[in-house]
Amino acid sequence: MMPRERLRIAVQKSGRLSEPCFDLLDRCGLRFRRSRDGLFCYGDGEPVDLLLVRDDDIPGLIAQGVCDLGIVGRNVLAENAAARQTALQCLRSLAFGACRLVIAVPQDMAYAGGGSLARLRIATSYPNLLRDWLSANGVDAEIVTLAGSVEIAPRLGTADAICDLVQSGATLAANQLREVDRVLDSEAVLVGSATLPADGRRDAIELLLRRIDGVVRVRGSRLLLLQAARASVEAIVAVLPGAPSATVLQMDGQPGQVMLQALCADELGWRQLEAIQRAGARELFVLPVERALA
Ligand code: PRP
Ligand code: ZN
């Protein structure tokens, strides 16, 4: 394969992870132009391009050296490891795309633990994770491997139960299935091959990791600014959600008055603000936090 100078990241073309992936990369200051066929996104500025593919293909593309990094659900990474296919490493958890791999059965089927699945057919796109879960639970069942549309298998009569990803639960509900056991908790992760490129792409990887850290660290957090009498500071800090550390600054020319700032890992809704105000604060401001650099 031709050596590449630009870093190439594989991301899901369309699906649960696509939009939050683009949002993360955008927050990392990466801008792209999409190719006409929609397969590539070429980076403007930084030497980073994207390849838009099916999420299940991402581990293979990294193993072949077609891409250097990829963003997948931990479920894809775990299935790959359970299949003992390629040596991938998880570089970062990305704090989005939370979901779970579960066992689900038809609404009216009785379930009293894994034993209820004995000798049944279970449809899944995660045969290796399911195989490991069944053997860990001492259940002898038949695994029916499907590439997609797993949730309709029970209605079609091609399986009795399924093992599939659930995020909101809407897909299960729409197919009259109910979740009965949990196989794996998942979220989006940044993965790379076990040995990362040692050439110029290494700089782009380090830049990306630094920026991802700066985005993920403050994701959803708010900077709270307020004024108060110094005597009220203790009471105010006691009602700050998540017990953040607060910085207290003396206000010029106003003895006994301070300005307080705190980074809160929370939305800070009206009720929380009102409680802080009752504790003695005034002039409260809640600011979004975009990025951080240590
Ligand atoms: C998963 C799963 C369901 C859906 C569940 O698909 O297979 O179709 O998400 O989400 P819900 O509980 O919010 O309804 P995924 O996004 O991984 O796409 P893929 O199966 O095409 O890889
Ligand atoms: Zn998939």
Image (cartoon, rainbow, N blue to C red):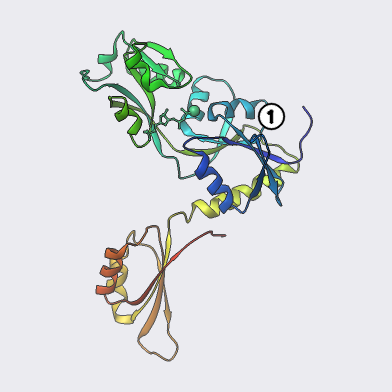
Q: In this figure, which residue is indicated by the disc labeled 1?
A: 65
Say if 108 sits above or below 54 in the image. Answer: above
Q: Residue at x 37, y 11 (%)?
A: 158
Which residue extends farthest front? 36
What crowding class fits label 1: few (fewer than 14 Cα within 10 Å), some (14-19), or many (20 or more)? some
Whether the residue carrying mark 1 lies under 8 Å from ligand 2 is answered with no
Instruction: Residue lying at the far bottom in this picture: please name it.
Output: 253
Name the one closer to the observer, 75 or 210: 75
Q: Which residue is drawn at 37% across and 36% down?
A: 167
Q: Is residue 57 above or below residue 30?
A: above
Q: Which amino acid does label 1 sit on?
A: Gly
- Point out residue 206 in the picture as x, y percentages from the top left corner: 65, 47
For ligand 1, which image quadrant applies? top left
On the image, the x and y values in percent for residue 258 come to 38, 81
Residue 42's x, y, as percent? 69, 43
> Which quadrant would residue 103 be assigned to in this image?
top left
Q: Is mark 1 on a helix, strand or loop?
A: loop
> Is there any visible trace of residue 93 in the rendered image?
no
